[in-house]
Amino acid sequence: MTLDLIDEMAVTKVPLERACRVLGLSKRTVERWRGQCGGEDQRQGPGSLPSNKLSEKERELVLNVSNSVEYRDLSPKQIVPKLADKGTYIASESSFYRILREEGQLSHREKSRPPSRKPNEHVATGPCQVWSWDLTYLRSALRGCFFYLYLVVDIWSRKIVGWTVEESESTDSAAALLHRICIELGINPMGLVLHSDNGGPMKGSTMLATLQRLGVIPSFSRPHVSDDNPYSEALFRTMKYRPCYPSKPFASIEEARASVARFVAWYNPEHMHSAISFVTPEDRHCGRDMLLLERRRLVYERARGKHPERWSNATRDWRHVETVALNPEGDSAITIADQEKAVA
């Protein structure tokens, strides 16, 4: 294994002396290994079995006990003491763990943990049908302290419909933001789907009460699965990877809010999003994208008519994206998160 690592480093032009220094070896040791039997490991391992190895009957007893009705929901750390209380010793905890690991039974052997099901699919055919929201940290000048950006995006148009920057994570702030967005847009949120992850502000009592009062349908990601909420994750990446995003921490919350306001002022009316045929979120949200896309199609058709020899295939596809799915079912579910991160 060591010689293989050295060979890999040699391919990348790493000198032998440097490779040996990294691995904690001397150059002479490596040369000696290569000179012995062509560098092949000649060790055969122990010639006899350990005298203290468990017999097959004892190994089978460990498995039977671990999978019995009485102990199948317990870990070896609990099984061994319980056996000792009954005056029984079969093997040590480490032996229990080793045998269960070898048999592929070290995970949950029974339904002691509920299955993690993928969230239901939600399909948007127009604006204000499915929203996604999340929080992200904004560094402050005080080390270890952050400001918190709450951002709500319409997944159909990709428009940022609302945001706020606060000094803490709060379900009250999230609920107030949602209520304010509905008033500013002048919409009836009844039946609107709001997707988020499983954070405290998302599932707090104030937020859930606000959703119920407004008639909004809550949707949540699986625990620790960021790909269930790709639209918000991609939007945060777009914001923080822009060249003009501040490289230094924000000196105050006012400075953080001003920075986010500049981003939203650019993103909604200017950013051409590739997942919606390179139209801006504002144009798509307001229904102006269909006319823009038709104009582009005509431009390409005229260009092809002038020089048809330059076009081996059809012109670029400027079709209007009719539907957008959140956590789609079927084959498209495999790539939706990667696509969204790549095109944002």
Image (tube, rainbow, N blue to C red):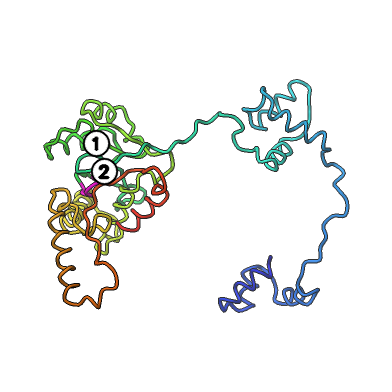
Return the x and y of residue 315 as percentages of the image width and height.
24, 67
Foreground pick, 300 / 283: 300
Q: Are marks 1 and 2 in contact (CB under 8 Å)?
A: yes
The residue that disc 2 covers is 150
The residue that disc 1 covers is 173
Return the x and y of residue 76 as percentages of the image width and height.
67, 32
Q: Could you tell me how many numbered marks the image carries?
A: 2
Return the x and y of residue 305 as percentages of the image width and height.
17, 73
Q: Earlier in the sequence, mark 1 or mark 2?
A: 2
Asked if 56 appears above or below 67 in the picture, the reply is: below
Give neighbour class at mark 1: few <14, some 14-19, many 20+ (Cα, 10 Å).
some
Magenta stretch prevailing secondary structure: loop
Q: Is residue 99 left or right of residue 323?
A: right
Secondary structure state at the residue bearing disc 1: helix
Query: Which image quadrant is residue 343 in?
Result: bottom left
Chain part drawn in magenta: 154-160
Secondary structure state at the residue bearing disc 2: strand
